[in-house]
Amino acid sequence: MQAPKIDPRTYQDIVAETETLAHEFSGWQPQADGVPDAGQALIRIFGRFTDLIIQRLNRVPEKNFLAFLNLIGTEPLPPQPARVPLTFRLADNAPVDAVVPVGAQAAAPPAAGEEDEVIFETEQELLVTRSQIVAAYVYEPATDRYSDCMPQVQGQSDTPFTIFAGTQPVDHELYLACDPLLLDAAGRTVRINLYSPEQWQWERWPIQWAYWREDGWQPLTVTSQYVTAPGQWQVTI
């Protein structure tokens, strides 16, 4: 954090202001042909010395700030090299993993107003592997919920996610196999009784019924469903 300048004027500002004052109070004006005269030389000498004084004056707040830091026992950190995150990727269809050694150099484009590139070096050895993350999920057993975190893990999304909390309910499937009864379930009436020792409220669940055929799963229409007792549910399809 830099302290505000006491006098923000530059050398050019001082010269321009002095020339204006000299013209107003003495009638002096520069040569018409643009050739510097003695007056312009004196003005520029005055501007140079004034600029030096202003530069020293503007350092006063900084010195006071440093004195305050010393008073509370805080010292500025010495200059340190810049650090940036780097991402290394293997070439397409690379046959083996690659090792990036310590001190491997990477160049960044020159900063504004600079000509030389900024060189960075790796701090430690890095193994670039061919293995890829296929899926990333979070599961919360207490609420039976999950979250798909693949966009955040792959860097496609910058939004944070909680690693032990799910946001979507987990789908559960129960398969009933009884060919004599269910082979042609669409053509007959089937009554199913479900019992829960924990007295689940079956009727509140978003349950869907379907049966398997050679061309895939086919939906079943529920003709009636009702609770026969706490934790007991009868479904007719």
Image (tube, helix red, strand yellow):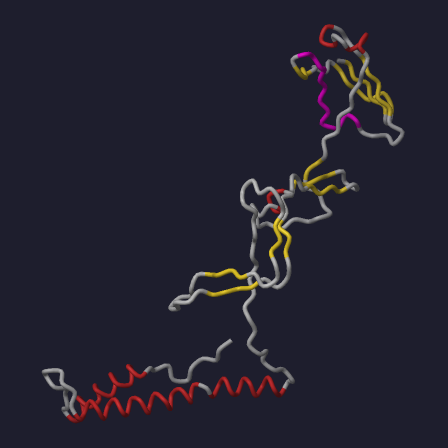
Q: Residue furthest left?
A: 32
- Identify which residue is drawn at 60% across, 42% down: 95
Q: Residue furthest right?
A: 197
Residue that sits furthest to the front in the current view: 95
The residue closer to the viewer here, 219 or 103, is 103
Query: Which stretch is magenta?
Result: 202-214
Query: Which of 100 and 77 lies nearest the eye of the viewer?
Result: 100
Q: Residue at x 23, y 93 (%)?
A: 42
Q: Is residue 28 left or right of residue 151?
A: left
Q: Nearer the viewer, residue 80 or 8?
A: 80
109 displayed left or right of 186: left
Seen in the picture, residue 174 relative to 99 is either above or below; the reply is above
Q: Position of residue 137 (x, y in %)?
A: 69, 41
- Residue 213 included in the magenta stretch of the image: yes
Residue 200 sits above or below residue 104 on the image: above
Residue 26 part of the magenta-drawn span: no
Q: Position of residue 27 (x, y in %)?
A: 14, 91
Question: What residue do we see at 63% from left, 56% from top?
Answer: 126
Residue 93 position (above or below residue 11): above
Please state the horizontal and vertical placement of residue 16, each as a whole percent of the image.
24, 83
Q: In the rendered view, does 5 fall on the left or right side of 171?
A: left
Q: In the rendered view, would you say 189 is above or below 53?
A: above
Q: On the rendered image, what quadrant is the C terminus found in?
A: top right
Pick whichever, 95 or 182, lies toward us.
95
Q: Position of residue 222 (x, y in %)?
A: 72, 16
What residue is at 54 percent from the left and 42 percent from the top? 92
